[in-house]
Amino acid sequence: MEATAQIMRDQGYAAATSRRVAALAGVKPALVYYYFATMDDLFLAVLRAGAKASLARMRQAITDDDPLRALWVMNSDLRFTGLYTEFMALANHRKAIGTELKAYAERVRDLETAAVTVALRAHGVDLDEYPPVAVSMVVSQMARSLSNETTLGVTEGHGEFRKFVERHFDRFGSASSAERTQRA
């Protein structure tokens, strides 16, 4: 499964064939089909394993002293955003992948919204003026967007945008500047 994820990250989902997966994993191609009846079954297993790990990280982020910043960092990780992008592309062609990805995305949205709700309430922010689901979408989607652009080599405005985001995190975060510096 890790070989499949690596090929998807490095070369795209279309490159993840049973032969390439087997070669990278150091096994015979028949062994791939021994464990997974189809490549879609393998893709689903990779997606489910990644989703489980991601949801565990997400639950940990909710309990962070600075959950908004933790969500930003998590959604900025190129290893995960690249693989997620490949699954999005694959979902356009495979209904089962799309169904699984939708269920995962909905769980993520719920967890992100819960974390943002806690952070905003802790700082007395008006939840009608700043709906937690909207704030969570801005944080997660912009982090992923910057990651996608970085992958393409587009970085103009990224530094300024990150500073802009940091100013807002400083407003809503509970971690001290010294603690944030230590984390970075």
Image: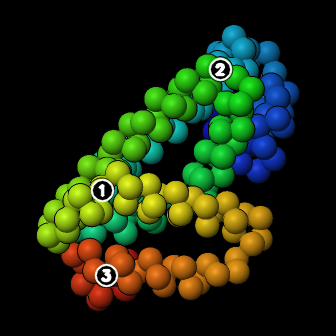
Q: Is residue 172 or residue 60 the one in the foreground?
A: 172
Judged from the image, the secondary structure of the residue bearing numbered disc 3 is: helix
Q: Which residue is mark 3?
A: 170
**Dots 3 and 1: beta carbons under 8 Å?**
no
Q: In this figure, which residue is indicated by the disc labeled 2?
A: 95
N-terminal label among 3 and 1: 1
Q: Secondary structure at mark 2?
A: helix
- Residue found at the very far front of the displayed protein: 129
C-alpha separation, residue under disc 3 versus residue under disc 2: 41 Å
Question: On the rendered image, what quadrant is the C terminus found in?
Answer: bottom left
Up-down: is 21 above or below 75?
Answer: above
Numbered-mark total:
3
In this view, 51 is above or below 71 = above
The location of residue 50, given as percent across then percent down, is 52, 39
Question: Can residue 64 be seen at all in this image of the molecule?
Answer: no
Q: Is 89 in front, or is 24?
A: 89
Q: Hey, what amino acid is under mark 2? A: Lys
Q: Mark 2 against mark 1, which lies toward the viewer?
A: 1
**Rendered image: mark on residue 131:** 1
Give the camera-side residue of 24 and 145: 145
Asked if marks 2 and 1 touch (Cβ < 8 Å), the reply is: no
Quadrant of residue 73 within the rendered picture = bottom left
Q: Earlier in the sequence, mark 3 or mark 2?
A: 2
Residue at (65, 20) in percent of width and height: 95
- Going by the image, does 48 lie left or right of 115? right
What colour scheme does the image use?
rainbow
- Asked whether the viewer can see residue 13, the reply is yes
